[in-house]
Image: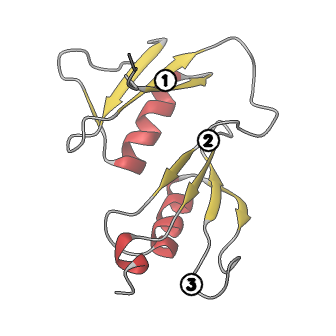
Amino acid sequence: MTSFVSHTTIDCADAHALSRWWEGVLGYEQDPADPNLPGHEECLIRDPDTGHTLLFIEVPDGPKTTKNRLHLDLRPRTGTRDDEAARLLAHGATLVADHRGIHGPGSGWWILADPEGNEFCVLRSRAELAGG
């Protein structure tokens, strides 16, 4: 017997605002039959291509104070890692660390955080990995 990942859950203070922010980051969509609205304590968004879902749930824990134990690694669908990091910073992400070149020229990643401080990484695109 085995299990599968139903969805990835992100605890947060404002499920609607954070789900909308991540929609813009990932190009995910809301379920038209169950739209996310201000005040909803649970908001789900879905990748229209893969079906992967992120569920944002409001929790009373207060703001994030320590490093994530689990995080998302993002790979640009098009363009480059650096272009995507610039887009996300303009979208409201904050820079946590720049690890570009950590393993030599052309290697590495950016560590960014969403508006609630949840960290995520931006990796090189598939084209960059292939040398294209």
Local packing at callout 1 (Cα closer than 10 Å; few below 14, some 14-19, many 20+) is: many
Q: In which quarter of the image is residue 101?
A: bottom right
Q: Mark 2 points at which residue?
A: 115
Q: Quadrant of residue 67?
A: top right
Taking the spot 44% from the left edge, 41% from the top edge, the residue there is: 22
Between marks 1 and 3, how big is the CA–CA gap? 34 Å
Compared across the picture, whether 1 is left or right of 18 comes to left
The image shows residue 72 at horizontal and vertical percentages of 53, 45
Identity, as a three-letter code, of the amino acid under mark 1: Phe
Taking the spot 65% from the left edge, 76% from the top edge, the residue there is: 100
Give the number of the mark in front: 2 or 3. 3
Q: Mark 3 points at which residue?
A: 106
Compared across the picture, whether 78 is left or right of 129 comes to left
Local packing at callout 3 (Cα closer than 10 Å; few below 14, some 14-19, many 20+) is: few
Identity, as a three-letter code, of the amino acid under mark 2: Pro
Tags 1 and 3 touching, CB below 8 Å: no
The tag earlier along the polypeptide, 2 or 3, is 3
Q: Name the residue under label 1.
A: 56
How is the protein colored in the picture? secondary structure
The image shows residue 53 at horizontal and vertical percentages of 35, 30
